[in-house]
Amino acid sequence: MYKNLRLSIEQKTPLTDEEWKLVVEKVKFIKLKKNEFLQIQDSNSSYEGFILKGAFKTYILNDNGTESVIFFSFENEWMCDLGSFYHQKLTTYNIKAIEESEILVISKTNKAILFEQVPKLIQFHIIMVEKANIAIQQRLIDVLNKTSKQRYLEFIEKYSHKAAKINNRNLSSYLGVSHEFLSKIKRRC
């Protein structure tokens, strides 16, 4: 069941069977139905997670009640509210399943214990944090420098296997456009 997690880790850091057993002992399996929350904005609950199955949206709820989707996350991807997880602050984002999903999560406490038990995982952790920072920077650059149409086409290309499962409301929020404008983009493509 956790095979894809092991493959993800071992792409950068090989593990012995004993080390892998320690990893499995520290993670928790969570199954969520569509529209169930893994994390609620402004709460004390934050995990680092690896998605086994399904899809999630990470978003903020604005003061006017609208959603701003920051990221989508899919199978075999990691996701985390970095500020909350690493600094034990209230969560910044809502993380919600957009389809039936299965995820393995680890708490900061269990991750620290795991680093003591398997120190070479620290290098894997550094690589993960670097990738997250690059993804955040790329998202910011895309929002600032690319048109909505360019961002839409790149999203469809990158996530062709999942794009159809994302409804127009979520996709338009991610792109920062109205539903009507998204419909125009789709018609032109």
Image: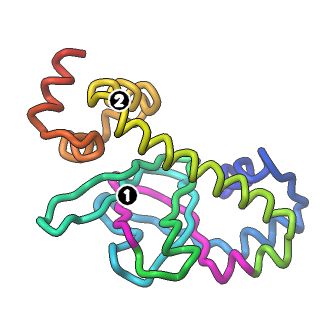
Q: Quadrant of residue 188?
A: top left
Give the image location of residue 37, x and y in percent. 35, 68
Q: Quadrant of residue 160?
A: top left
Asked which colour scheme the image uses, the reply is: rainbow
Q: Residue furthest front?
A: 145
What's the mark number on residue 15? Answer: none
Residue type highlighted by circle 1: Thr
| N-term mark: 1 or 2 | 1
Give the image location of residue 63, x and y in percent. 16, 69
Give the image location of residue 68, x and y in percent. 26, 55
Q: Residue 147 versus residue 60: which sits nearer the camera? A: 147
What's the mark number on residue 146? Answer: 2
Q: Is residue 1 visible?
A: no
Q: In 3D space, how far apart are the residues under numbered discs 1 and 2 (Cα atoms)? A: 21 Å
Residue type highlighted by circle 2: Lys
Where is the N terminus found, in terms of image quarters?
bottom right
Task: Answer above or below: position of 115 versus 8.
Answer: below
What's the mark number on residue 58? Answer: 1
Instruction: Specify the segment rendered in magenta.
Output: 92-112
